Image (cartoon, grey):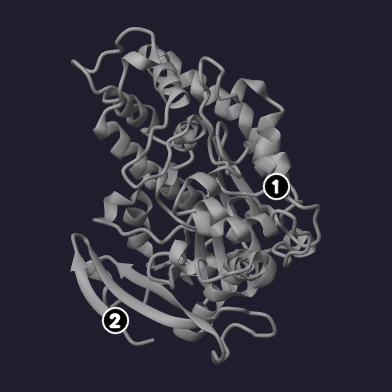
Amino acid sequence: MPRLASYYIPGLYVEDHSCRVPLDWTGKEPGQSVDGASISLFYRVLCSPEHVHDDLPLLVFLQGGPGGAGPRPMNPSSEGWIAEASKHFRVVLPDQRGTGRSSPVGAATMSVFHKGREGADYLKHFLADSIVRDFEHLRRSSFAGRKWTTLGQSYGGFLTLSYLSLYPEGIDAAFTTGGIPHIPASATEVYEHTFPRMRAKTQEFYARYPQDEARVAAVSDILAAGDVRLENGDPLSVEAFQTLGSNFGMKPSFETMHWLLDTAFRDGDGSLPGSGAGDMHLGEDFLNAVMTRLHSKPLYWPLQEFIYADGEIEPIHWAAQRVRDEDPSFSTSARPLLFTGEAIFPWMFEQQGQLRPFKAALDVLMEESHWNRIYDTGQLARNDVPLQSAVYYDDMYVDSGMQLDTLSRVGNAHAWVTNGYEHDGVHGDTVFRTLFEQARDRGDLEAVFS
């Protein structure tokens, strides 16, 4: 594909590219010409400056999410894995369909659908089966069918197993970090495992910053007592405040929350004043920071529970809300207040302006029982593509026990289990290097570098 642009950033040579892919892959095969309704697939290719003219093997990064665009590195070390990968590979960074510069989907996109069924059918095109076919089309059409190595972070690990199910012939070797789904997939099972981890993470936060327990309670009392509005007009409810714990499984999330609460109160020096909600007012800087945190990644929340939908299933029916309702410790009136993690709730699509246009489609999808297949358990059992996975023992989002159970049933899979990192460990300078060296020393990369 012709380059849109080429340039250097510190330590990296970058090329921008774009191609067209079908909106609906039904009846189509990757690598064929694209006709009918189509969308853009944007991707970057980067390498170290000294390798610009070298014939390097390819590594494609499968971004986390769902609804996550590819990284925009500032330099090799800003995304720790890139510093190591760019020594050995030409790195491909796609924006998954609906994100970044790949025909992004947001509130304006969904506002054109006047019926929930229409919006639901549209959103179903932005899940793993379509994403993997996009990438396989990219490999065949833009990289002359050369095999590549995959690196899947978080949801990118889900995509990895879909890729190994659908097109294993396209992959020389695969790496995943914190992202092996449980198969068979079940959103309810996932939240039954992760809500206890949300509780434990909140307790760990309060243990580190004991003074913040009272500040969180005071903020919650203010929100419960009055009509607090963000600058964009959205209400700020206790439930919405609780979702700020969504990054408690990453670093430095505890410190981020601590300093957010530091400016929670407007009056005096911002100390906790008195005990009555009527005596306190929330600070503007705090509210603006909360609004920024709540309004990002417009596809991340709408697709969250549907990444577990595989084939014929019982309707998901708001799995996280159902599991939460069974645990009174997550009540908005409970003290200490518990924060929630990577979980969506129906009220979000009523309270938050950027999500309201998704509501009708979500109501339909939550009752849907028929989905495209994303995993082939037989193919995964027969898998001969070397798969090296970092499994974080204390992962807040993807239960380590469930990951290991799946890996035990995938051929040629190897797990490195560690409690030394949070879910975003790949962004440091050690995790990918460790996986790469383990695979190399085992001989799993001979096909890549032959």
Relative to 254, residue 345 above or below: below
Is 407 left or right of 427, judged from the image as shown? right
Residue identified by numbered label 2? 4
Which of the 4 image quarters holds residue 302? bottom right
Q: Nearer the viewer, residue 105 or 199?
A: 105
Q: Nearer the viewer, residue 404 or 221?
A: 221
Q: Give percent across and percent down for residue 110.
A: 51, 66
Tell me what residue is drawn at x 31 percent, y 75 percent. 16
The 10 Å Cα crowd at callout 2, few under 14, some 14 to 19, many 20 or more, is few
Q: Give percent across and percent down for residue 79.
A: 33, 51
| Residue 412 visible in the current orientation | no
Residue identified by numbered label 1? 182
Is 409 left or right of 226, judged from the image as shown? right
Query: For the residue marked with disc 1, what is the amino acid?
Result: His
Q: Give percent across and percent down for residue 385.
A: 63, 64
Relative to 118, residue 209 above or below: above
Tell me what residue is drawn at x 64 percent, y 59 percent. 161
Query: For the residue marked with disc 2, what is the amino acid?
Result: Leu
